Amino acid sequence: MTDSKKLAEAVNKRRTFAIISHPDAGKTTITEQLLLFGGVVREAGTVKGRGSSNFAKSDWMEIEKKRGISVTSSVMQFDYQGKRINILDTPGHEDFSEDTYRTLMAVDSAVMVIDGAKGIEPQTKKLFQICKMRGIPIFTFINKFDRDAREPLDLLNEIEDVLGIETYPMDWPIGMGRQFMGVYDRYNHRVALSHPQDPANPYLPLDEDGQVIGENPLAGEGEWKDALDGMELIEMAGSELDEEKIAKGDQTPVFFGSALTNFGVKTFLETYLKFAPAPSAHKTEDGKSIDPLAPEFSGFIFKIQANMNPKHRDRIAFVRICSGEFTRGMDVTLERTKKPIRLSNVTEFMANTRENVENAVAGDIIGLYDTGNFQIGDSIYTGKQDIKFEKLPQFTPELFVRVTPKNVMKQKSFHKGINQLVQEGAVQLYTGYNSNDYILGAVGQLQFEVFKFRMQNEYNSEVIMEPLGSKTARWVDPEQLDPKMASSRNMLVKDRYGAPLFLFENQFAENWFKQKYPDVKLTAKL
Ligand code: G4P
């Protein structure tokens, strides 16, 4: 691929998205169905272990197993109707939300899966807010209508009220649970039957007034009447499908269905592809916008993961390509060090042999085998661009532990392990301001457990973790800092960039500090 027209064609084919949902809403099941349509897997149930919320927090092996497997399914790529789709997986467990947040920086749109019986759940809300902050399009699939679910109108209202986004139902369920008969597909002008008499022909066409053309097997059913009433209400409310609003993340097209029985997923995919954006421009720290069609290559690392094979200590750095084209063996500059690096050991994801020959372009994700060169948030580029992409959000940890090696003779492996796991973003590291204490911060307890397990298994370093409990982290201006301000209720530490912060025991301790030092400015995030 050499000329710009070919590059533009390839880039504009890309659709890169993540599925956001609360554990158990059906993300895995939908992903599997999508991969089936894409011809990547032949059988459902092959993506990964299910029910990520179910595993016991102390079950190290299970975590390890899942982590390993998730490397291969972290990015799933397939072709469908002339588009090349990249689905970025996001860990389901809420303790890994930091990882998920960063992954959301690498997509151009998101699919929000909601359990029809449960509605908006905490994790959905958190992830939605990240997408909203980025202003990316969000598409909604309300799942599990083969079971008893909440009233569709009620679910739509909840999305609007709780998430603050306008909804546009693309279809409307006809019944639910055992009486789930299909959907009134407003967008495609048809009724899709979940139990058609002739499975080869599951649709009833609609005329211009929305009436079924020909015989309607549902005509006498109460569910049919209810669905028409629902549709009428929606029509009366008068919201229009608005592409501009969708593009900005101000309106979400909503689909109803059942991933388990594979009802509605295909319609969803096909309609989604009509609206989902091609790779968008990414901003740099100095406010420039990098055009995905620019000929020079650029990208950023949004995730680093240890290889699934513990015998080989290599790691994979995931790069979102933001512009240009990647070719194997190309030389890039690593912005942080300004040093050249040759990208020869690279993996693409789930691409079949034919696709392997083709190169990756803006919108795609490539995995670089990393021996310790890369950090999360690093930018890489070709030519003389000197691009530094916008900082990835760092989440202020709420839980802290003090960590020491069990065997003091094994300092080397202890430090190596900590450094690498911190670079991977597994936990955040703080050091005592006036001591050599190592303090780890995390968003969820499970992060510590995985850390401890991996230190032992991958770095042969047994660690002792002394819980410090939950704390509020507040950064302080070094100019205003007097180390005497620290006490047992507000520990003074440094983050990995050397910036000082206090870890307050609770709100009370923070208020007390503010009263005592009214001029000292505290900030929640660096
Ligand atoms: P997740 O990745 O979002 O965590 O959810 P996942 O797809 O693993 O689905 C969670 C559970 O919900 C699974 O049941 C799955 O079979 C079920 N499920 C998903 N979609 C639907 C649907 O449309 N209708 C119904 N009725 N159930 C659905 P499980 O019992 O935890 O796992 P399994 O034993 O079925 O594998």
Image: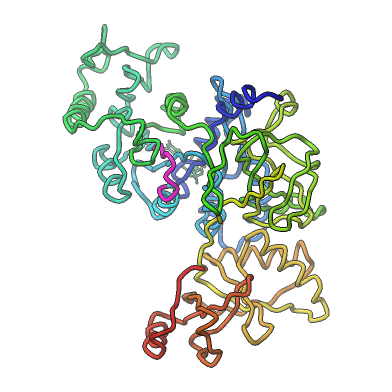
- The image quadrant of residue 360 is top right
Can the viewer see residue 277 in this picture?
yes
**Magenta segment includes 187:** no
Q: How is the image coloured?
A: rainbow
Along the line of sight, the residue nearer the viewer: 25 or 490:
490
- Which residue sits at x=62%, y=22%? 5
- Which residue sits at x=25%, y=39%? 151
* Quadrant location, the N terminus: top right
Relative placement, left or right, of 252 versus 295 is: left
- Residue at the extreme top: 214
Relative placement, left or right, of 90 versus 420 is: left
Along the line of sight, the residue nearer the viewer: 354 or 394:
394
Q: Position of residue 516 (x, y in %)?
A: 40, 91
Range of the magenta residues?
132-140
**Label total for image:** 0
- The image quadrant of residue 352 is top right
Q: Position of residue 90 (x, y in %)?
A: 55, 47
- Which residue sits at x=42%, y=25%? 271
Relative placement, left or right, of 58 versus 210 is: right
Q: Position of residue 234 (x, y in %)?
A: 21, 31
Please determine whether, in this image, residue 518 is positioned above or below residue 226.
Answer: below
- The image quadrant of residue 384 is top right
Along the line of sight, the residue nearer the viewer: 445 or 147:
445
**Magenta segment includes 139:** yes
Along the line of sight, the residue nearer the viewer: 245 or 33:
245
Please determine whether, in this image, residue 235 is positioned above or below residue 61.
Answer: above
Please determine whether, in this image, residue 136 is positioned above or below residue 336.
Answer: above
Q: Position of residue 338 (x, y in %)?
A: 73, 55
